[in-house]
Structure formats: structure tokens, C-alpha cells
């Protein structure tokens, strides 16, 4: 059972995607694991033939438990593999043991053509295993999935939107002509709230998230914690357990990590104008939002100030070899996940943007990969879209820094003795004082600001 | 493009970005980002789909004109009359 995030103690096997005798490659998704926060796709850490599945569907086991045994390549499965030839799939040494294994390169996001085809066929691309370069999903993969599931007739919905992760979907309650925000509608479906019975308090009587929560089964008794059936938690249960997982990790962070905070204001004039010119030449699908530029700057700065990129383990700082940028993604209906964009400092801006879009989509539809949740080396939270000016975050242990971006907004700024209106963003850093001092934090933020003045290099 | 065609395209695009939302009965003057709780990535997706559906190029400079359904219809129909 792999550690899928620093706050995970145990996991439940929801589904095996392989069976004994199947050949697997490193990075293949072999199982779906349910954690407190989400259902997560777990990849194989080695190549070979599945020898046996040790943990059955529906079983909950602590992290570090062997899930399956893989016979290494070159061995016939028929011949019982000697113990030495078996590589046990623990891959779950707690984060502190070693630097996590080199991450599998995240697959390239599917092309618009493939997305379109998947949509036609009612296939959730996040569930398709890619066989193209770097695990990219090809058209053939999509067709293959479509063909494979014909007999199963597993009700392919034409709706590609986020669903309650892996829970059995109830028919959406028809709410007639009433206006309901998408968040509220999703939440209602998750909580089993009949929208017809909800009083809307939004504009023109629109039903908002809060209204659904009010009508929801808030005071229900806690269901038994033992999950007997191989079903994922209910959405309600998930919201609660995710809250608890966040609570534990954040409390631990504030208890153990002596945070210090620094902030600065970066002039975004050049960055925005450069981005504007760049986007003007590009098709919508290739356009980059300012948030992606900020992420790139944060990743490059972490590369340049490596003292903030890594883990505090056993009373010492261990720098990471690459920048895996954790991105805080709010989950509609409550909670958040912080999957990582692997090797973010090395990615072209357009690529990073595509990864970010892909991650957000999959985080919200409950289809993240294990490797994405286990190995962020520094995390970014961006609350700009929510309109806040600045955000001072809480570090995700064992990481040692958390970067916060506020909203890019026009402010009066004095330049050369003259006051003018310029777009600016307030950048913050919360850092672990055990690992670094304020001087290093200041250098990090200055580096971000400087990078944003040279957007063409991002 | 006629106003009806424009509105259909808008509803389809919004429907895809916000699955399950009752976009049809959204008032013409309601702010799309606020009412449908769209973030910048959601909005980009909306623009993307709208552009695909209508064959219209939509630049960033045009985004302010996509604030509401009514203004978006105006934008789309004003561009290529008829």
C-alpha cells in the first residue's frame, strides 16, 4: 500500500485493474485505492508479470502492506518465481524513508480530437490507459476502451463532468426550471438532497451550495467506519474524512513546524502584456492564464533556491532533485487536494498550463494518480480567482515551504517618482524555520518577482 | 449567425463546462462567472467550446464582452451579421 500523501495511514483496494499473469510496465495503473481524501489510481513501480494479488478488493490495509507480487521480466510465470526474483510491490515506505522513486512522467494531455472522440463515446479520459509516447492517450486507446466496454454496457454517460468519485450515480433529480449553481447541483446529487425541496437564497431564488448544505443530512449518525463492500465512501463520508485528513496534517504542521512568513509585491505589467501578446497569436486551447505563469515562476525559483525545495526529515533538510510543484486544488463540495506537477521547472509554459488543466479536471473527478499525490517537493496555493489579495499558507510536512499567490489586480504604484496604475500580485511564502531563515525566503520571493519581469524566459 | 443560433451555442458550451446546471433558464443579464461560479480555467474552457462551435475566433480582448448571455449573443451576432 503506497503512501499517497503525507497524511495517509491506510487505504482500501477498490479495484484491481490487473490479474495474475498480466504483464505490467513501470507506471501502468494497476489498481484503484480509496483513501480518506480520494479514490486514487496506483501505478506499478516495476515491470514484470503479476504473480499474485495479495490484498483483495474491499480490504483495508496499512501503508507499507504488500499489495501484489510481480515476477520480474524474463521469468515464465508458469515456473514458480523464486523469492529473490520477486519484487514485492510495497512501494510504500513512508515519505521519510527515501526520496520517492523517480516519478513516472505524467502523460501528455490528450489532443482535442481525442477528447472530442472520448466525449462522443461517453468515455472519461482519465480512466483510459495511454499507450502513446510518455503514456499519452491515443485515439486507438479510446476506441479500445469503447469496444471493450460494449458488452458490459456500464452506462456510459454523455455527461463528461465531474462525478462523485466512484460512487454509484443516482439519476440526477430533475429540478424543473429552477436555477441551481453547478456546485449546488453536484453537491445535491452527492448528498442525495432533493433540489425541489431546497429553498434558494441566491439571486432570483437560485439554489446555491450553502442552501443544499442546509437541507443536507448534516446531523445524520456516523455510518460504521468499517467498509465492508468494495464501494468507495459516500460523498458525504468522503467530505468528512477528507476534512479529518486535512485537520490531522495541518494540525501537525502547526504543532511541529515553526513557520516564518515573508511577502512581496510583484509588478505584473510586463508579464501580462507578454502573455497577452502570446495568447493573441494562439488558438484558445493553447492560451495560458496568468496562474500558469505564476506557477512556472514559483517552480523556477524553487530550482534556483533549492534550500526551499525538499523535505525536513530526521532533523535535517533533504533537498529534492527535481521540482515537483504541488498545486492546491479546491474540490467542489469541500476540501482540497494537492497533486504535483512533476518536473515543473523543466516544462514549457504551454505544457505546464496543459498539466494544470488536466490535474484540476482529474482532481475534481477523483482520478488522480498515486505518484502525483506522493511526491510534491514544494506547494503553491493560488486564491487569486477567489478575489483575495494575499494568502499565507500552512506548510505540508515534510515539505518546508508553501507559496501563496493572491489576485492580480491594478494598484497605484510609484515608479520613478510617479504614481501610476499597474497590475500587481502579492506573493507570499510560508517556510519552515528549521530548514531556512527569512533571508532565504526573501531571496526566493525576490527571485519570483525578477522572473516575472522576464516572462519570455519562463 | 442569428441570435437563436448564438444562444444555442452558448447554452451548449455552458452546459459542458458546468454539467448539470440549468443554463437554459439562466437570466440573459446574469454574470456568467459569478452565477455559475466559474474559475479562470472554467471560463477558458467555455471560450474554447464556444469558439469551436461557432467557428468564431475569440480573443482575450473579447472576454469582457462575454460577461453575460445577452452580451455574448450580441458579440457573436455582431461579428458576422445574419
Image: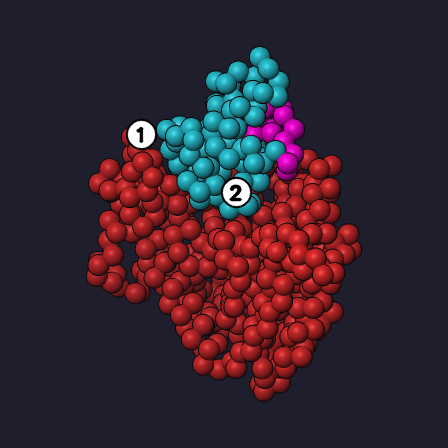
Chain colours: A red, B cyan
The residue lying at 57 percent from left, 24 percent from top is B76
Relative to residue A153, is residue A292 drawn left or right?
Answer: right
User: Which percent across, then down, holds residue A432?
Assistant: 57, 78
Residue found at the very far front of the displayed protein = A417
Q: Looking at the picture, does residue B37 appear above or below residue A260?
A: above
The residue lying at 51 percent from left, 68 percent from top is A393
Residue at the disc numbered 1: A177
Image quadrant of residue A179? top left
Residue found at the very far bottom of the displayed protein = A315
Q: Does B55 appear in magenta? A: yes
Q: Looking at the picture, does residue A378 appear above or below residue A258?
A: above
Q: Does A75 appear in magenta? A: no
Badge 2: chain ID:
B
Q: Are marks 2 and 1 on the same chain?
A: no
Badge 1: chain ID:
A
Instruction: Please indicate, yes or no, whether residue A37 appears anywhere in the rendered image.
Output: yes
The residue lying at 51 percent from left, 80 percent from top is A257
Q: How many marks on residues? A: 2
**Viewer-side residue, A303 vs A321:** A303
Span of residues in magenta: B50-61
**Viewer-side residue, A119 vs B63:** B63
Image quadrant of residue A343? bottom right
Dot 2 falls on a residue whose secondary structure is helix
Image quadrant of residue A178? top left
Residue at the disc numbered 2: B42
The residue lying at 45 percent from left, 81 percent from top is A255
Crowding near pointer 1: few (<14 within 10 Å), some, many (20+)?
A: few
Q: Looking at the picture, does residue A222 appear above or below residue A190?
A: below
Relative to residue A180, is residue A110 drawn left or right?
Answer: right
Amino acid at each position: 500500500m503506497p503512501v499517497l500523501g503525507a497524511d495517509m495511514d491506510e487505504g482500501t483496494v477498490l479495484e484491481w485493474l490487473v490479474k495474475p499473469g498480466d504483464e505490467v510496465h513501470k507506471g501502468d495503473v494497476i489498481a484503484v485505492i480509496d483513501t480518506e481524501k480520494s479514490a486514487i489510481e496506483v501505478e506499478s513501480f516495476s515491470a514484470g508479470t503479476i504473480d499474485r494479488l495479495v490484498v483483495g478488493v474491499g480490504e483495508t490495509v496499512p501503508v507499507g502492506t504488500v499489495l501484489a507480487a510481480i515476477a520480474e521480466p524474463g521469468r515464465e510465470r508458469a515456473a514458480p518465481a523464486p523469492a529473490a526474483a520477486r519484487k514485492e510491490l510495497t512501494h510504500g515506505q513512508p515519505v521519510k524513508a527515501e526520496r520517492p522513486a523517480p516519478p513516472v512522467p505524467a502523460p501528455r494531455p490528450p489532443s482535442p480530437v481525442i477528447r472530442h472522440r472520448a466525449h462522443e463515446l461517453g468515455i472519461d479520459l482519465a480512466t483510459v490507459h495511454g499507450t502513446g509516447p510518455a503514456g499519452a492517450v491515443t485515439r486507438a486507446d479510446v476506441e479500445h476502451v469503447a469496444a471493450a466496454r460494449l458488452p458490459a454496457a456500464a452506462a456510459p454517460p454523455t455527461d463528461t463532468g465531474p462525478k462523485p468519485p466512484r460512487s454509484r450515480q443516482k439519476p440526477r433529480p430533475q429540478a424543473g426550471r429552477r436555477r441551481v449553481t453547478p456546485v449546488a447541483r453536484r453537491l445535491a446529487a452527492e448528498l442525495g438532497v432533493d433540489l425541489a425541496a431546497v429553498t434558494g437564497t441566491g439571486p432570483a431564488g437560485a439554489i446555491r451550495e450553502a442552501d443544499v448544505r442546509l437541507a443536507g443530512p448534516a446531523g445524520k449518525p456516523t455510518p460504521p467506519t468499517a467498509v465492508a463492500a468494495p464501494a468507495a465512501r459516500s460523498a458525504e463520508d468522503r467530505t468528512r474524512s477528507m476534512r479529518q485528513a486535512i485537520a490531522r496534517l495541518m494540525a501537525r504542521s502547526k504543532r511541529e513546524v515553526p513557520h516564518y512568513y515573508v511577502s512581496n509585491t510583484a509588478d505584473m505589467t510586463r508579464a501580462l502584456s507578454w502573455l497577452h501578446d502570446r495568447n493573441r497569436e494562439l488558438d484558445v486551447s493553447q492560451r495560458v492564464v496568468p496562474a500558469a505563469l505564476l506557477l512556472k515562476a514559483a517552480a523556477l525559483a524553487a530550482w534556483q533556491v533549492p534550500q526551499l525545495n525538499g523535505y525536513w526529515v530526521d532533523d535535517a533538510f533533504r533537498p529534492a532533485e527535481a521540482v515537483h510543484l504541488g498545486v492546491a486544488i479546491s474540490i467542489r463540495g469541500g476540501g482540497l487536494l494537492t497533486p504535483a506537477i512533476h518536473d515543473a521547472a523543466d516544462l514549457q509554459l504551454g505544457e505546464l498550463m496543459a498539466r494544470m488543466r488536466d490535474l484540476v479536471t482529474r482532481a475534481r473527478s477523483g482520478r488522480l494518480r498515486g505518484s502525483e499525490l506522493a511526491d510534491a517537493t514544494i506547494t503553491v496555493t493560488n486564491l487569486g480567482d477567489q478575489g483575495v489579495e494575499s494568502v499565507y499558507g500552512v506548510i505540508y510536512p515534510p515539505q518546508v515551504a508553501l507559496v501563496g499567490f493572491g489576485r492580480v489586480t491594478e494598484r497605484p504604484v510609484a515608479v520613478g517618482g510617479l504614481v501610476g496604475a499597474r497590475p500587481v500580485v502579492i506573493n507570499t511564502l510560508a517556510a519552515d524555520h528549521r530548514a531556512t531563515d527569512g533571508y532565504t525566503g526573501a531571496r526566493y520571493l525576490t527571485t519570483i518577482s525578477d522572473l516575472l519581469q522576464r516572462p519570455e524566459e519562463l | 449567425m442569428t441570435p437563436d443560433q448564438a444562444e444555442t451555442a452558448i447554452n451548449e458550451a455552458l452546459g459542458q463546462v458546468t454539467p448539470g446546471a440549468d443554463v437554459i433558464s439562466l437570466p440573459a443579464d446574469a454574470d456568467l462567472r459569478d452565477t455559475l461560479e466559474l474559475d479562470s480555467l472554467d471560463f477558458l474552457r467555455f471560450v474554447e467550446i464556444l469558439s469551436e462551435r461557432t467557428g468564431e475566433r475569440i480573443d482575450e480582448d473579447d472576454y469582457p464582452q462575454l460577461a453575460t448571455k445577452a452580451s455574448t449573443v450580441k458579440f457573436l451576432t455582431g461579428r458576422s451579421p445574419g
